[in-house]
Image: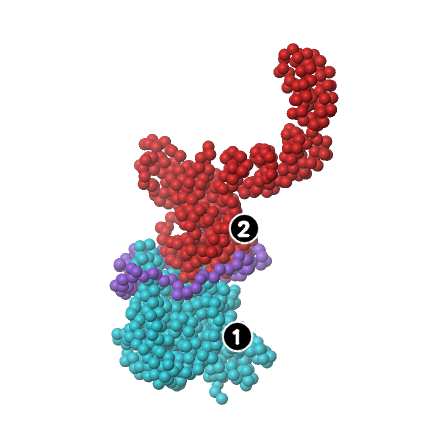
Amino acid sequence: MIIEGKTGTWEIVVGLEVHAQVVSQSKLFSGASATYGGEPNAQVSLVDAAFPGMLPVINGYVVEQAIKTGLGIEATVNEVSVFDRKNYFYADLPQGYQISQYTRPIVSGGRLVIDLPGDRTKTIGVTRLHLEQDAGKSMHDQSPTKSYIDLNRSGVALMEIVSEPDIRSPEEAGAYLKKLRAILRYLGTCDGNMEEGSMRCDANVSVRKVGVTEFGTRNEIKNVNSIRHVMQAIEYEANRQVEALEAGETIRQETRLWDVARGVTRSMRSKEHAHDYRYFPDPDLLPLILDPKAIARIKAAMPELPDAKKARFVEAYKLSPYDAGVLVAEQEQADFFETVAKGRKDPKLAANWVIVELFGALNKKGVDVTNSPVSAKNLAGLLDLIENETISGRIAKDVFQFMVETGKDAASIVAEKGLVQVTDTGAIDAAIAKVMAENAAKVEEYRAGKTTLFGWFVGQVMKGTGGKANPAKVNEILKAKLSG
Amino acid sequence: MSALNDLTIAQLRDGLTARKFSAREVADAYLAAMEKQRGLNAFILETPDVARAQAAASDAKLAKGEAGALEGVPLGIKDLFCTKDVQTTAGSHILEGFKPPYESTVSQNLFDAGAVMLGKLNLDEFAMGSANITSYFGPVKNPWKRKDGKDLVPGGSSGGSAASVAAHIVAGATGTDTGGSIRQPASFTGIVGIKPTYGRCSRWGIVAFASSLDQAGPMTRDVRDAAIMLGAMAGHDVKDSTSVPLPVPNYEAAMTGDIRGLRFGIPKEYRVDGMPAEIEKLWQQGIDWMKAAGAEPVEISLPHTKYALPTYYIIAPAEASSNLARYDGVRYGLRVPGNTLDEMYENTRAAGFGAEVRRRILIGTYVLSAGYYDAYYLKAQKVRTLIFQDFQEAWKKCDVILTPTAPSAAFGIGDKADDPIAMYLNDVFTVPVNLAGLPGMSVPAGLSGDGLPLGLQLIGKPFDEPTLFRVGGVLETAANFKARPGA
Amino acid sequence: MSLDPATVARIATLARIKIAPDEQVRIAGELNTILDWVEQLKTLDTSAVEPMTSTVEMVMPQRADQVTDGGYPNKILANATEPVRVSTTEEMGGFFTVPKVVE
């Protein structure tokens, strides 16, 4: 995105730090539950509350999840990584330090291909992914004089995924987050739920005059809880910085908060202290050493990821890149489509039905594909009825409506409602004869050369058969009869 | 028969198993002795009710013939070990009144073996000190007196443990050793103390001082008792990521008395400037005893010895500054109010920590801070590697190393108090052992000119505690140290 | 590298230990004594030496991903100053409290 300022044109530079909660039963260094919610401080072990003498022991599954994610963003999984302590005081940080990875992260140097309008793509570098502990939760609105602290989240495993400053617009930032979320969900390493906070995003935003190669001073916008808000926050912050710079001010490096209600970013008072995190290797832990064979095993078991799936859909099902992109955005959608499309002569028909009819209906109902009233098997059944000419495409749409409402399969609805398509030429002949007899004048007009009436005749015949006549057959026979 | 509280752990074990006396009688004898010696200030908290209840349980087990290795043996627990529902302070105001809802692995292991807890023993605040004068609960007195009658320090940080073992008011005590905190007070009070290899005893539930150096160990009247007690304390713990999964050998069985052919190293760099002649003489005496027992002395070099103390005084405070960040007035311990969160933190930590702890936190914060990390902390970690390598080289030439434990006998309460460096020098012979993660044992070997006990230190290879017990037993026999405080 | 009173104030803030301004000079002196003493490490050439954090020579153990802990908010809150209890029953839990924070 380019901002036209008073003094020239400006370019936005954005890097994103995503905190993705690792899908796991228990926490990174303790056996307490990592589940969202729970009574306050009921999912807290003595380790999470930092009682004296408590020690961390790492969750092996979380390590595996980080490896998987690293492979998913085409990064290097480091065979040796180190856990460091990041020291600072805060009410929801019981240890007085966060166990994180600083100089030696478990994953480094990955990339993500983002999808942009017009089938364009762009590669965004991923600097690193490291494992760290989540903090607890502070609640500031419960009492006039106190903040309340709940440590249920304290110690939950997070992956911090840091992008290169390769992002140049709010749209690219949105596309990056969507793609990253899709990959995390495909891998089952993070549920990507931004509302519950299991995926959070900090955006580092700076601006510079177009053509300038050095980066400007950046500000970090903290913990924005939806993709839309991230995009809005970046746009606001970039414009704010341009205005400030053009007014002759300098940008002070600081942490800012996105104020959803007012749609502005503002300086965070609690972060005013000069930071000096005093990172050093956590002496309660040893270096994390990974067995290359274990990494290879995880690699061999990796699921197909969105980009690969999209390419395969285009190739195998002859879908447009756009349709394929829509289908692979969520793994469940892609799986649904494949169940419907598998072995079908016309997979594009399947794509159309899934994207237009099904997604349309789901949208109206406000449910996602996993809660679809029409199962993939039932939608496939419906398409079978179209393909074997049991029903017409028009009737199929009515049948589909019944399916959405009742959850029943297509064949039962068709049988129940007597919607089987009429392909018996005798019945069609009779209907045509009836229409022609009742409209002798129009027949004469047609025969005199007013062939545009053909469509009207088709309509009448279809009406006469309750819409059940096979349109192709009607066309064929009607043409012959009218020609005399 | 001697008084019950004059019996060693081994003698108690034999007497209890033979039902010559009951665990309850033993506990009562100790509780009475403990009361008489309150002047030592060895205990922060006496737990007679716990002791009597545990002794009764021990008697039941003894009756059924199900006695553990320490069944009915009354011990003192350094107040750095968290004890379930029993106040644990680390000698600090900031933890005053804290009752852990959990039991440290080591104390649990001891109780599982049948041990009886007499109380929580005084120590330097957060185990930071070499004289047990930094405790919020007051200094501990050494039961030994100088000829001039002056009150002496028991050494530190396990000063309450050392004083109580020496005064026979506990049969044994737990200690922890980060830079000498078991061995130096053992030397100052004429008892045996062993710091095992790092990773041998679980650190879970022990208030952390410097995590990469802290290690728990026993403090007892003789080597055999230390072997019995360590056997019960040690073991792999899945709750401690630095606990090593090795089986615990039978340390008592290692005491064969036979050290013929053993090569023992004499590090030339331990002949430090200004070392008192009596220490030098004691060391030579130790060499002669071991030679007489058939072992062979070997001169070795530990060239980076002189850098060990400065290295330690960067690494230990750095780790401590982070380990002690959790004492913030929120979840347990002292809270001093403040108008803001930061004010509450600053007030609480200023009031809760004593001067030495504050000093070390500040040093540790500084050496980790931006711009100084490389010059101090990283540098110290590199020198630690050199010190570690010195020992690895030494093990090519010898099986065990013999040194003095401390450069002096116990000094007066108040001496060296305003000179931190002079105080730190107490640990000159013990600190390298912690930096290298090795086992070290102090054995009482003689008396100073002032009539005060002096110890010799044995340093072993990683997890070679059996050799320390074997050699320690031989030294003990040769030294025949029978002196008692106040005798 | 001599440490001045301003630096003492800065690290005291980092460590959240209140130090009165009139104490800063004295404490700077104490800390400088120690820092001057550890300066001797500078005489060693460690350019080719790897730093050592732990003497333990084993691969870090990993736990299985199972919920084995937590579920005892009463214990967690028992030693706290001014906790706010949601209810007195064990499973209901409650909050720690601190002076109000403005974000």
Amino acid carrying label 1: it is Ala
Q: Residue at x 51, y 33 (%)?
A: A320
Q: Secondary structure at mark 2?
A: loop
Q: Residue at x 39, y 76 (%)?
A: B441
The answer to which of A267 and B313 lies nearer the viewer is: B313
Say if residue B405 shows up in the picture: no
Give the class, few, some or many, for how many residues have Cα within 10 Å of label 2's Cα (few <14, many ≥20): few
- Calculate the distance from the C-alpha at mark 1 to the C-alpha at mark 2: 41 Å
Q: Where does label 2 land, which residue?
A: A36
Q: Residue furthest top?
A: A448
Residue C59 lies, in percent from the top left, at 44, 62
Q: Label 2 marks which chain's residue?
A: A
Q: How is the image coloured?
A: by chain
> Which circle marks residue B113 in the picture?
1
Q: Label 1 marks which chain's residue?
A: B
Residue B300 lies, in percent from the top left, at 31, 74
Q: Is residue C38 left or right of residue A368?
A: left
Q: Secondary structure at mark 1?
A: loop
Q: Residue furthest bottom?
A: B1
Q: Which chain is purple?
A: C
Residue B344 lies, in percent from the top left, at 42, 56
The answer to which of B144 and B289 lies nearer the viewer is: B289
For chain B, give the colour.
cyan
Say if residue B18 shows up in the picture: yes
Mark 1 touches mark 2? (CB < 8 Å): no
Q: How many marks?
A: 2
For chain A, give the colour.
red
Residues behind callouts 1 and 2 on a single chain: no
Give above or below for B387 relative to A482: below
